[in-house]
Amino acid sequence: MKYDVAIIGAGPGGIFSAYELLKLNKNLKIIMLEAGAELDKRKCPIDGVKIKSCIKCPTCSIMNGFGGAGAFSDGKYNITNDFGGTLYKYIGKSEAISLMEYVDSINVANGGNKTKLYDNNNSEIKRLCLQNGLTLLNAKVRHLGTDINYVVMNNIYNQLKDKLEIKFLTPVEDIEDNNGTYIIKTSKESFEAGNCIISAGRSGSKWMEKICHSMNIETKSNRVDIGVRVELPGIIFKHLTDELYESKIICRTEKYEDSVRTFCMNPYGRVVQENTNGIITVNGHSYDDPKLRTDNTNFAILVSKAFSEPFKDSNEYGESIARLSNMLGGGVLVQRFGDLISGKRSNDDRIKNGYVVPTLKATPGDLSLVLPKRILDGIIEFIYRLDKIAPGTANADTLLYGVEVKFYNMEVKLDNNLETDHKGLFVIGDCSGITHSLSHASASGIYVARHIASNINN
Ligand SMILES: Cc1cc2nc3c(=O)[nH]c(=O)nc-3n(C[C@H](O)[C@H](O)[C@H](O)COP(=O)(O)OP(=O)(O)OC[C@H]3O[C@@H](n4cnc5c(N)ncnc54)[C@H](O)[C@@H]3O)c2cc1C
């Protein structure tokens, strides 16, 4: 059987491309191949009692399966060209925003109708930031929350599941271009398709590199963002989070002129650990349901680094730092800001006596043994600047979890249709290296679906 379209990966990129393809032409024969499990079968074994830390399952339920890395995320869909990816460079700014708005309307129609759309174009907070050497980036953000995000994914799954073939626990091993027909190979069988959309996300980054290499698709190195996740009493950031939910604030450090920013803010949320290719890093999420909220707000502070010559592998640099923290802490490390500043390792007692109750069980340690000086200096400088717009950020009991690393896939050479030099082979979402967020990945799926549907319909 030859399919019209094969979609590799059932994350937001893959899901929204399938959604739009079927909306535009319900007769298309589509197959979706996903390395992980169905949404309701995705369960991380860490229960905090019998299994306290990552046991490195063959497929990670947090990262793989229907919904992709976004399934248990905070479900913050940012509508902006200022961050979250560079899709606009390929398709134009207004098209990118209009696709993100369209994705938002689908989420709203599928269970997100009671959630709030925040708009951060607030001049008062912007002014406060600028007066303190910080810049607040423009964005609208729909906060679905981990709970509603799940409902939306489940509703979309129920709509799609009988209209296309979905094969779970089926990682694609190889792709072959047979004169414009794609042979998609798994360990058990092969599938033929006229068009192939690759949407393998961050967890598929190493596999994507292998495919680019074997198919002679050019790639170029991307940046890596390294830092910590900050956890503090929610009340300290209340004036920002009530108004904006998430504030993306950036600055350039004085000495090194590095770009430092806040990332993934979770009001009244939880710090969680994340497993990327076996490396344990930290992340965070929060819930829409007030009953599931905590007293703390968490967000990342990240310093961006890119390398050129002779060392180009930014991800390897980030991985080495994360491995070092895993070596010292057996997973995630946590340190009080006061201990970091006074050059002391945090220990259980000091964490217990602090007034910020950690929401993640992590190993008390010393982040200065893990993070390079330049990165640590940038984080400390940024915390003191944030303290001016949200006094209390630099309190001694503020918790810093490390390390948080944002890996970006190598940038794949694509044309303005997000198509490779192989006609009919498209790369979308985070595995393309051009999106890094739910809304950009989803928008790229819609964009490519429209292009393929119009080619087929004509
Ligand atoms: C804990 C967490 C919280 C996050 N919170 C947010 C947030 O609030 N807002 C935001 O904008 N972004 C957030 N993100 C990032 C966001 O989830 C991603 O940007 C988004 O999911 C990317 O979508 P994607 O479809 O490109 O890739 P993914 O969601 O990673 O999906 C890719 C899918 O492809 C599958 N796959 C990989 N390789 C293969 C293969 N060889 N064969 C078959 N299948 C394969 C994977 O199993 C996966 O299911 C978060 C990420 C995490 C981990």
Image (cartoon, rainbow, N blue to C red):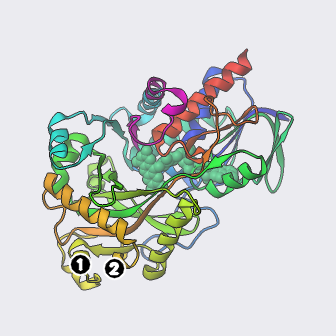
The front one of 107 and 390 is 390
Instruction: Quadrant for the C terminus, please.
Output: top right
Image x and y of residue 311, in percent: 58, 63
Q: Is residue 88 above or below residue 263?
A: above
Q: Is residue 360 visible?
A: no
Q: How many marks?
A: 2
Image x and y of residue 180, in percent: 82, 33
What range of the chain is rendered magenta?
75-98
N-terminal-most mark, 1 or 2:
1
Instruction: Return the residue found at the far top.
Output: 458
Q: Is residue 226 magenta?
A: no
Q: Which residue is tagged 1?
A: 339
Image x and y of residue 390, in percent: 15, 54
State the residue at coordinates (86%, 34%). Answer: 179
* Drawn side of residue 137 relative to residue 430, left or right: left
Disc 1 and disc 2 in contact, CB within 8 angstroms: yes
Does dot 2 land on a helix, a strand or a loop?
Answer: loop
State the residue at coordinates (26%, 36%). Answer: 120
Label 1, label 2: how many angstroms apart (C-alpha)? 8 Å
Q: Which residue is tagged 2?
A: 366
Q: Disc 1 residue type?
A: Asp
